[in-house]
Image: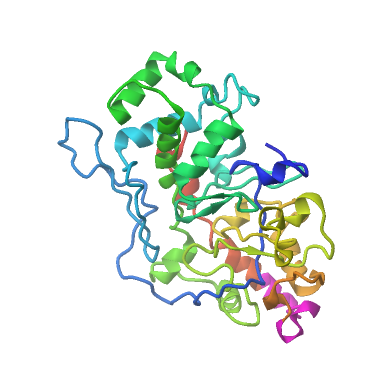
Amino acid sequence: MRINSTWVGSIVLVAIIGISLWGCKKEQNVVPETPNSNGTNNGINQGPNDSSKTNGPTPYQVKIPVGFPALSAHPENPLTVEGIALGRKLYYDPLLSQGGPLSGMSCSGCHDQKTSFTVSGGPVAILPHVNLAWNSKFLWNGKIEGRLEDIMAFEVDDFFKSDMKVLAASSEYQKLYNNAFGSTEINSRRTAFALAQFFTTLISGNSKFDLYLQKRRTFTNLERVGYDLFNSETGDCFHCHGYPLMTDNAFHNIGLDSTFSGPNLGRYLITQVESDKGAFKSPTLRNIALTAPYMHDNRFNTLEEVVEHYDSGVKKSASLDPLLKKGNRVNGLKLSSFQKEALVAYLKTLTDTEFISNPELAKP
């Protein structure tokens, strides 16, 4: 689950993620003071639509956090209580990889709930599994496109190379697949579908920041200054990390390097477009305080170092994102020490403690 110059083009969701805070092409609106009126939790405690249902899988309705876009279900993979339970079991079970090149590993081995479903260390960052149901391009360079079902198929078939005979030999899994899909047939498509259902429930949208927007919490003066700066042209963070997902799910060269080769070519390895050299996907900033170190290669250990990069460390290149060039921005944001401190304070309000401790997302 680590990369070299050839792995970047094919590594799965569990492999890498970095962080880019500023300097992107697609602009998003500044966060409104109050999105909608009714408050919600993370949306993974919502029960079945019809608790009296006895025939077949039980439909399950995910409650979407306030201000989030609606989700459209896969027409052939509606959410069910039983499907989510199966996906959750598979997520934590090393049996999923048994017989393949990564035998003994599970999804959870590189994705710890306590740190927003990621782990630290290694030569590259590990992608946190947060709000991925709103993604359409996956992996650090966006090689896999489509729905969660598509990236899960890649993970089952190409990354883990899961041996369905191993799962089929388990009487427990025969029962779980029967409950979820109406028969004991165990195949890679059903496995990917079940994983996709569980991933859909990995929703984070109940941070102090969200409660502040709902007028249920208050910010300190420092957090409020950071919030305002984040959503201003001075800080210039919101273009790539706007509300509510805190990412535009696009790809940007944020000036980490001036020349590029191997994995650091980023999106260019997929598109062969010159302007994509050094461009990587903007990650969500939700729970960002929990996911250090930062950038695709783990070069920064703290959020303070990340802020300092945008303030004074951006490197020029032909493919540098246009927003990092505007107003002589390439020479830095020229923030004061207080402004830098305020930005970090605000970023810490994006931590969702309910998400990282919810027992419904933990190992069954």
Residue 207: x and y in percent read 47, 59
In the image, residue 102 lies in the stretch drawn in magenta: no
Q: Is residue 362 above or below residue 348?
A: above
Image-based side of 216 in relation to 151, left or right:
left
Residue 30: x and y in percent read 50, 77
In this view, the residue farthest toward the left is 52
Q: Work out which quarter of the rendered image holds the C terminus and state it.
A: top left
In this view, the residue farthest toward the bottom is 327
Number of marks in the rendered image: 0
* Chief secondary structure of the magenta portion: helix
In the image, residue 331 lies in the stretch drawn in magenta: yes
Residue 282: x and y in percent read 61, 61
The answer to whether residue 364 is seen in the rendering is no
The answer to whether residue 129 is seen in the rendering is yes
Displayed quadrant of residue 345: bottom right
Displayed quadrant of residue 268: bottom right
Q: Is residue 89 above or below residue 247?
A: above
In depth, the one of 360 and 332 nearer the eye is 332
Q: Name the residue located 33 percent from the left edge and 45 percent from the top edge.
A: 45
Q: Is residue 12 above or below residue 100?
A: below
Residue 242: x and y in percent read 53, 70
Magenta stretch in the rendered image: 326-341
Q: Name the residue located 75 percent from the left edge and 69 percent from the top edge.
A: 319
Displayed quadrant of residue 235: bottom right
Q: Work out which quarter of the rendered image holds the N terminus and state it.
A: top right
> Colour scheme used in the picture?
rainbow
Q: Name the residue located 17 percent from the left edge and 30 percent from the top edge.
A: 55
In this view, the residue farthest toward the right is 259
Image-based side of 75 in relation to 291, left or right:
left
Q: Name the residue located 44 percent from the left edge and 76 percent from the top edge.
A: 32
In depth, the one of 4 and 30 nearer the eye is 4
